[in-house]
Amino acid sequence: MSEQKITIKDGKLQVPNNPVVPFIEGDGTGVDIWPAAKRVLDAAVEKAYNGERKIEWKEVLAGEKAFNETGNWLPGETLDAFREYLVGIKGPLTTPVGGGIRSLNVALRQELDLYSCVRPVRWFEGVPSPVKRPELCDMVIFRENTEDIYAGIEYMHGSEEAIKVKKFLQEEMGVTKIRFPETSSIGIKPVSKEGTERLVRASIEYAIQYKKPSVTLVHKGNIMKFTEGAFKKWGYELAEREYAEQVFTWAQYDRIADQDGKAAADLAQKEAEQAGKIIVKDSIADAFLQQILLRPAEYSVIATLNLNGDYVSDALAAIVGGIGIAPGANINYQTGNAIFEATHGTAPKYAGQDKVNPGSVILSGALMLEYMGWTEASELIYKGIEGSISKKRVTYDFERLMEGATLLKCSEFGEEIVTNM
Ligand SMILES: NC(=O)C1=CN([C@@H]2O[C@H](COP(=O)(O)OP(=O)(O)OC[C@H]3O[C@@H](n4cnc5c(N)ncnc54)[C@H](OP(=O)(O)O)[C@@H]3O)[C@@H](O)[C@H]2O)C=CC1
Ligand SMILES: O=C(O)CCC(=O)C(=O)O
Ligand SMILES: [Mg+2]
C-alpha cells in the first residue's frame, strides 16, 4: 500500500485513514514517556474507529539520539519529514545552559515557522493543586513562537562581536546607559508587526471558534516600549481593524472614557459583553502572574510574546497540577504544519526510570488528534485520564500530593488510561 500523507487544501487539512506521522522520541525522560504515549494514542484511535483508521508512526531523529547516530543534532531529514507530512509530535529535547548548541526545540519552531505555540490549561477533577479553586483556571495560551529574544541574537562579553555592537551603540547611537560596558554581554530582542499580528489573529480566531469571552494581550510594554509596548498596540489595532464586529477592546474603552467619561465606557463594554462580543484587553506581565493566582476566572485566551509565554506556561501549568499534564502545539495555520509537544523538558534526573507522568505528551497527542479532526479518539483519551485520576491511580507527581493514591509507573499510567477509555 502506498504511503498516505496529511495535506492541506484551501486552508483545510486533508487527513487520510492511515496517515504517516513523524515523531521524535526525545532526550532524557523521552525514552519513558514516548512508548506510553504511543500506546495510549494507538489504543484510542483503534477503539474510536475499530481499526478503520490508524497512524503510521515514522521515527525521525533529533537531539542526543540524532547526534549519536548521525553526528548531527537536528538532521535535515527530520525537518524535511515534518515539512512533508505536515503534522508531527515530539518528546522533549535538552538544551545546555550558557554554551553549547542552541535550543533544538526553538530551532524546529523557527525553521518550520510554527508561529503559534498553543498551550491549553485546564483542570481535571481530582488533580492535586496548590490553589483552592483550580477549576477556575481555564485558559489557552497563544505564545509567539518565532521571535523575541529566542531569535538567539546575543553576544558574549569579551567577544569581538560584543565589542563591535557596544561600540556601535555607544558611538553611533549615543547610548550611555550600559551600566558596566566592559563586562556586558549583549542580547537583541526583535518583535515585529507581522509576527505580532499573525499570533494575535490566531488567538482571536480561536476565541471566536470556541466562544471564549476574552483575549488578554500580556506584555511588559511599560518597560520595553517599542517591542512589548508595540505588541500591545499592534494587537489592539489588529483586533479593531479585522474583527470590528466580533470584539470590543480596552483601547476602545479608553477612547470612550476620554471623550464621554468612565460611565459611558463601562456601559459600552457591558453592551458589547451582552452582544456576545469578545473583550480584548491587556495586562502587564508581572501583574498578570499574580492575577492568574488571585483572579483566574477573569482570563480566558492569552496572547503573548515568546519569553512571557514560556514563563506563563509553567506558572499556569502548576495551578492545574503541574507540568506533568501540560500539553502544547506549535502551529502555522497557513501551511498547516504543526508539531505537538509537552510544556515540560527532559527532566534528566528521572530519565530511564519509567517514573514520570506521560500525561503532557499524551494530552499533546489528544490535541494532535483534534487538529486532525479525529475528535472521537481524543475524547477517549480525556475519558481515560479522568478515569485514572478519579481512581487515584497516578504517577509520582500526583501521588505525592494525593491522599490514598496508588503510585503507578509511567508505563502503568499509560495502561491505566487505556483501561479507563
Ligand atoms: N520543549 C522542550 O523540549 C523543552 C525542553 N526543556 C529542556 O529540558 C531540560 C531540563 O529542563 P528543566 O528546567 O529541568 O525542566 P523540566 O521541565 O525538564 O523539569 C523540571 C521539573 O518539572 C517536573 N517534571 C518535568 N517533566 C515531568 C513529567 N513528565 N512528569 C512529572 N513531572 C515532571 C519535575 O519536577 P519534580 O522534580 O519536582 O518532580 C522536574 O524536575 C533543559 O535542557 C531544558 O532546556 C525544557 C522545557 C521544554
Ligand atoms: O528549548 C528549550 O530547551 C526550552 C523550551 C521551553 O522551555 C519551552 O518551550 O517551554
Ligand atoms: Mg518552557
Image (cartoon, rainbow, N blue to C red):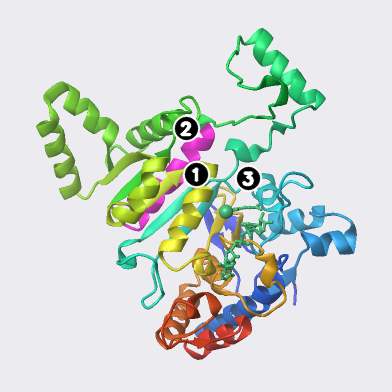
Q: Is residue 237 left or right of residue 338?
A: left
Residue 373 in the image, given as x and y percentages of width and height: 49, 68
Q: Are marks 1 and 2 in contact (CB under 8 Å)?
A: yes
For the question of whether residue 4 can be seen, the reply is: no
Residue 228 has which mark? 2
Residue 285 in the image, given as x and y percentages of width and height: 42, 41
Q: Amino acid at mark 2?
A: Glu
Does the beta carbon of the residue at mark 2 sit less than 8 Å from ligand 3? no
Q: Which residues are magenta?
A: 194-212
Q: Can you say whether 325 is above or below 53 in the image?
A: above
Q: Nearer the viewer, residue 23 or 205?
A: 23
Residue 349 in the image, given as x and y percentages of width and height: 69, 68
Label 1 to label 2, Cα distance in Å? 10 Å
Question: Quick one: label 1 or label 2, which is nearer the N terminus?
Answer: 2
Question: Quick one: label 3 or label 1, which is nearer the N terminus?
Answer: 3
Residue 308 has which mark? 1
Q: Amino acid at mark 3?
A: Asp
Question: Quick one: label 2 or label 3, which is nearer the N terminus?
Answer: 3
